[in-house]
Amino acid sequence: MTQISINVDGVNYSDDVEPRTLLVHYLREQVGKTGTVIGCDTSNCGSCTVHLDGQSVKSCSVFAVQADGHEVTTIEGLAVDGQLHPMQQAFHENHALQCGYCTPGMIMQSIDLLNENPSPSEEEVRDGLEGNLCRCTGYQNIVKAVLSQAEGARTPSEAQGAQS
Amino acid sequence: MIPAAFDYTAPESVSEALEALRSDAEEIKVLAGGQSLIPVLRLRLAAPTLLVDLGRISELHGITDEGDAIVIGAMTTHHDVATNPLVAEHAVLLTKAAETVADPQVRHRGTFGGALVHADPAGDMPAPALALGAEFVITGVDGERTVTAADFFQDLFTTAVGEDELLTKVRIPKHTSWSGHYEKFTRVAQQWSIVAVAAAVKADAGTISEAKVALTNMGSTPIRATAVEQALVGQPATAGAIKAAAAHADEGTNPLTDTNGDADYRRHLAKVLTRRAVVSAAGV
């Protein structure tokens, strides 16, 4: 067992883990962050995407020991005081989910995408979500939701409306 | 799927890591970004008894300007290579290739050095490194040695790095006024290259004065398309001249046949993708 200290969604955790424990298993089974889901178990689907020190990673392809001393944000850490993150709200408003299984990863990757490129083209959004699969094939509305959050996409009145 | 149990060490310096590699553990694996290794461990295709994680060795991260070359630390991520201004200015072919590796999440973790030492014939970093004449700095207990790209890639998943050595940095000679393009053919998102072509060209007044072209997945190692390079030099940077030169792209290659395509199909792809890569690089 190896002792690790990780900040998850703003809270510090110290735990003993086996070195072979994947970050996604640690988050779900030891910290209880079951909002982060396991999809394909082969590093393809992106549904387990979280942010590690502010960058998106597939948590099935990182060992918990590698995250020792670092900060992790999961889908459960996005809402503040019950107020959805704007990207969560955009997915809701654009019907950007069908079964919902890919949604936690899609939202985490969409936020990362706009952090790196605040005003992407539609093609750049599709490329930026390359590592996330939606088996309902509901990509159209997912892309629409992300584009709705691009810089300059929202008029001031819409932005105000989303806050109220 | 959960990997078989292993011991784990995360040294903080290269010398500590080299010491760990000389321990008496039965099977030792070096963990860089883990984006190829962790899936392999999860499938239990490998079951090392000791994992040496290089993630905490700060001297292995970063990109520096060293006069006539840029030097990329082995643990620098694909994302950092793809977004680094020094790389964009002096080795734009690497920028273009790094942008195509897997997907954004993998590029945040996967490393330049890890991809090179993994030496997957379908991997995207070896061919651009070969094309640009990269020099590989390999460190062992006896010190550093430098290996050329031609000597570094030895076979399928096999490089010049010995079991008790580490690739620590890669020196890329500056190609400052060159342009470059990496043309990659895949059928679905985030797929490995079926074939890809790395091209860098230097053009003066509409004439190609120098050209470097290397192929991904046309053999067990990346292959320099020297016949194409020779056919390009001195030619006008026109679509017709480039197409004629690209017809040599499959010379000296030995592509495999698999479910993605047979060898003849890959030979065809090599020519088409070489034409596209050089046309894009030359801005035709």
Image: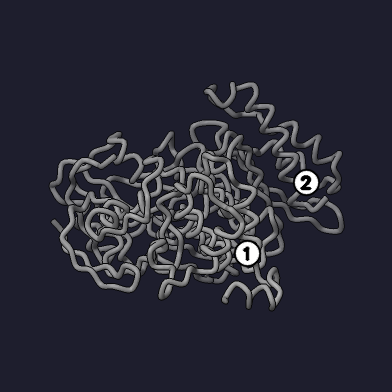
Identify the residue shown where x is 56% and y is 54%. B98
Amino acid found under the numbered disc labelled 1: Ala
Q: Give residue A83's position: percent from left, percent from top.
A: 46, 72
Alpha carbons under labels 1 and 2: distance apart: 19 Å
How many numbered discs?
2
In which quadrant will I find the N terminus of chain B?
top left
Q: The residue tagged with tag 2: helix, strand or loop? A: helix
Which numbered disc, 1 or 2, marks the residue that appears first in the sequence? 1
Identify the residue shown where x is 42% and y is 74%. A80
Identify the residue shown where x is 17% and y is 50%. B7
Instruction: Specify whether residue B31 is in view.
Output: yes
Badge number at residue B279: 2
Instruction: Specify whether residue B68 is in view.
Output: no
Closer to us: A66 or B152: A66
Q: Give residue B105's position: percent from left, percent from top.
A: 47, 55
Asked if B107 appears above or below B42 in the picture, the reply is below
Closer to us: A87 or B106: A87
Label 1 Cα neighbours within 10 Å, binned few <14 / some 14-19 / many ≥20:
some
Closer to us: A80 or B228: A80
Q: Give residue A31's position: percent from left, percent from top.
A: 25, 61
In the rendered structure, the residue with mark 2 lies on which chain?
B
The furthest residue to the front: A164
Closer to us: B134 or B41: B41
B178 lies left or right of A3: right
B71 lies left or right of B8: right
Q: Name the residue under label 1.
A: B88
Asked if B250 appears above or below A161 in the picture, the reply is above
Amino acid found under the numbered disc labelled 2: Val
B24 lies left or right of A37: left
Label 2 Cα neighbours within 10 Å, binned few <14 / some 14-19 / many ≥20:
many
Identify the residue shown where x is 60% and y is 69%. B85
Badge number at residue B262: none
